[in-house]
Image (cartoon, rainbow, N blue to C red):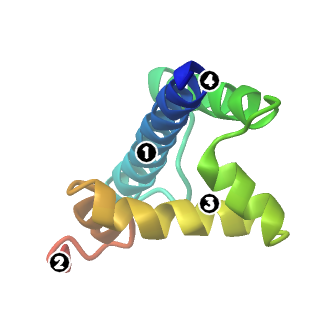
């Protein structure tokens, strides 16, 4: 009886896991570019292709008939893609202990990781 609910919860967890992975990759690319002194993250092949694969997975999950919770919330409040990603960043600060340090590095402030 709860099989559809369990299936949705599993897909929702996978979506969130992929979204956090995508965010970590994006922040790491920005931090590495800053460390190199680049104005913007350069295409370094492996990272860019992995970011693109993660983004594609997210977009496919968002288009499903029963989308993940973050997408449902985004649609209910009429959020733009940018706003959805800001919401993800806010949640990620609490869900993944690596995100604050990556945010600090991406801003050139590695000592402000708290």
Can the viewer see residue 94?
Answer: yes
Label 4 vs 1, first from the N-terminus: 4
Residue on which the image places disc 3: 85
Residue on which the image places disc 2: 114
Distance from the alpha carbon under mark 4 to that under mark 3: 27 Å
Quarter-of-image position of residue 67: top right
Label disc, if present, on residue 38 of the rendered structure: none
Between 83 and 8, the one nearer to me in the picture: 8
Distance from the alpha carbon under mark 2 to that under mark 4: 39 Å
Label disc, if present, on residue 4 of the rendered structure: 4
Are discs 1 and 2 less than 8 Å apart at CB?
A: no
Residue located 54% across and 42% down the image: 42
* Residue 79: % across, % down: 79, 68
Between 18 and 65, the one nearer to me in the picture: 65
Secondary structure beneath disc 2? Answer: loop
Label 3 vs 2, first from the N-terminus: 3
Secondary structure beneath disc 4? Answer: helix
Residue on which the image places disc 1: 20
Residue located 39% across and 46% down the image: 24
Secondary structure beneath disc 1? Answer: helix
Q: Is residue 85 left or right of residue 94?
A: right
Q: Is residue 49 left or right of residue 62?
A: left
Mark 4 or 3: in front is: 4
Secondary structure beneath disc 3? Answer: helix
* Residue 64: % across, % down: 79, 29
Quarter-of-image position of residue 84: bottom right
Label 4 vs 3, first from the N-terminus: 4
Label 1 vs 2, first from the N-terminus: 1
* Residue 61: % across, % down: 69, 30
* Residue 35: % across, % down: 31, 56
Mark 4 or 1: in front is: 4
């Amino acid at each position: 009886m709860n099989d559809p609910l369990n299936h949705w919860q599993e897909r929702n967890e996978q979506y969130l896991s992929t979204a956090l992975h995508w965010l970590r990759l994006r922040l790491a690319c920005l931090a590495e570019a800053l460390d190199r002194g680049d104005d913007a993250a350069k295409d370094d092949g492996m990272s860019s292709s992995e970011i693109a694969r993660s983004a594609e997975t997210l977009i496919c999950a968002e288009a499903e008939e029963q989308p993940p919770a973050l997408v449902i919330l985004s649609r209910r409040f009429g959020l733009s893609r940018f706003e959805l990603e800001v919401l993800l960043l806010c949640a990620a600060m609490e869900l993944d202990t690596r995100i604050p340090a990556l945010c600090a590095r991406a801003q050139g402030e590695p000592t402000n990781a708290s």
